[in-house]
Amino acid sequence: MPRHPPPPFDAWACLQAFNETALANLDPQGWGECLRAQRLAALMDVAQRKSPLYRRRWGRARTLADLEPVTRLELMQGFDDWATDRAITLDAASAFIADESAVGDAWLGRYLVWTSSGTSGERGVFVQDAASLAAYDAIDTLRLRGTAAMGLWGMGRSFAYVGATGGHFAGIATIERLRRLACTPWSPRLRVLPVTTPLPELAEALQAASPQVLVTYPSCALALAALQAAGDLHLRLDELWLGGEQLSPAQRQTLGGCFACPVRSNYGASECYAMACECRAGYLHLNHDWVILETLDAHGHPVPAGEVAHTVALTNLANRTQPLLRYVLTDSVRYLPEACVCGNRFPAIEVQGRADDTLTLPAGGGRRAVLLPLALETAIEEGSGVTQFQLVQRADETTLELRLASGADASAAFTGAAAALVALLRRHGVTGAHIVQGDLGPQVDAISGKTRRVLAAAGPPPPPPARAAARRRPRSPA
């Protein structure tokens, strides 16, 4: 049993968020723009008055566009001066999140705290107040979830969540909060399963749970779909909810056909849990009344609709306790220049998100083990304590090359990561794999300009460069 209750349910904040989101749905150009302007003015005011960090950064800036973009590293280094509640400190937050049993508990009696995975090279700690939680609930209910009209509040429905569970991550923290707030006989039935579970065990547990709605990552859904197509799994889903990774049109078609149900996807991050929701035409629509997302080129200048951004600057209009104004996300985003065919008047965007590979390795009894990218990444992070890495499966399939960013502790990090990977592989029945340390650091993809952290079977590695390995570009969370 948890030692503390979840953050208290704020009925007024929830009612206000739901009413305003519903009004914006009806009139995006009228109510939506008005609410957006009001929220931005209020956020800028509270940030300048109550956040020492933003007060220092503001300088001569008068508008949001005048403010210099801020990175996660800057915010984490100035964490104690960041929040508008002076009781929020990094030491106190770190002590709280060190206790994994406290996931979903209220911190300081009123906040929900979650962490990012650290793919940008710096783990983020994000504090959610009642207003931001109410906004995410309203967006989830009124814009994303379709026939499951109340999201995870759906009365009497059965859900299964397969995701990262080994810490205070946004997904599991949100799930635990909702599950514990909705504790009535009519509440949804929810089964939580770690994404690190070997695929046969995961399939067996899901079959026993028989969920109506499955919530997971595209890579996990595709692995389960292969079992479903082979007749080894017999899920009867009403809906499939996906997030956290890139979902291609071909993958969507495969999943929709295999599970014979609607596939719903969204775009979010640890910094802002609900940035865009998918429409019936398969496009993502920015939650324009709650989020400002500026597309920028490599020099920080705005790029027009139709062009792919080098980075984006995020302003989260929902959270005034830990303000995020012009926060840099290294996602590739493109605003569609034309109106969406679905009729939704919120801006439509395309996002190039995470697209790591699922690895398959030979296991005992002639079978092949399926290793999901997030399971591999979690093992490496927990074993090494580093977030800048790349795992490459070589052409012989049994050799896994771990590339680490250069640093004084690279040897110790490799030893810890290799031990964690060996333990994970053994759990999946793989005993003949070899973990080797790469001569290169993490490499940037030539097409996307980003670093993929897990790559499937590749040819022989290139010769090591004469000088230090290239450093990995940072990226955002899911």
Image (cartoon, grey):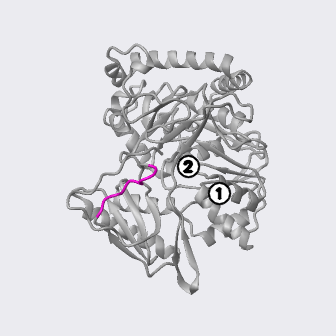
Q: Residue at x 46, y 63 (%)?
A: 455
- Residue 439 at x, y = what percent? 28, 66
**Which residues fall within the magenta stretch?**
440-448
Tag 1–tag 2 contact (CB < 8 Å):
no
Q: Nearer the viewer, residue 79 or 266?
A: 266
| Circle 1 or circle 2, nearest the eye | 1
- Residue 340 at x, y = what percent? 69, 34
- Residue 195 at x, y = what percent? 56, 60
Q: Secondary structure at mark 2?
A: loop
Whether residue 276 is visible to the viewer of this picture, yes or no, is: yes
Label 2: how many Cα within 10 Å (few below 14, some 14–19, many 20+): many
- Residue 200 at x, y = what percent? 63, 72
Q: Residue at x 29, y 54 (%)?
A: 470
Direction from residue 33 to residue 377 in the image, left or right: left
Which residue was labeled with disc 2? 244
Direction from residue 237 to residue 395 in the image, left or right: left
Decide: is 330 above or below 376: above
**Count of numbered circles on the image:** 2
Which residue was labeled with disc 1? 251
Whether residue 210 is visible to the viewer of this picture, yes or no, is: no
Q: Amino acid at mark 2?
A: Gly
Q: Residue at x 70, y 60 (%)?
A: 254
Q: How far, Cα to Cα, is label 1 from label 2?
A: 14 Å
Which mark is on residue 142? none
Give whichever of discs 1 and 2 has the lower sequence position: 2
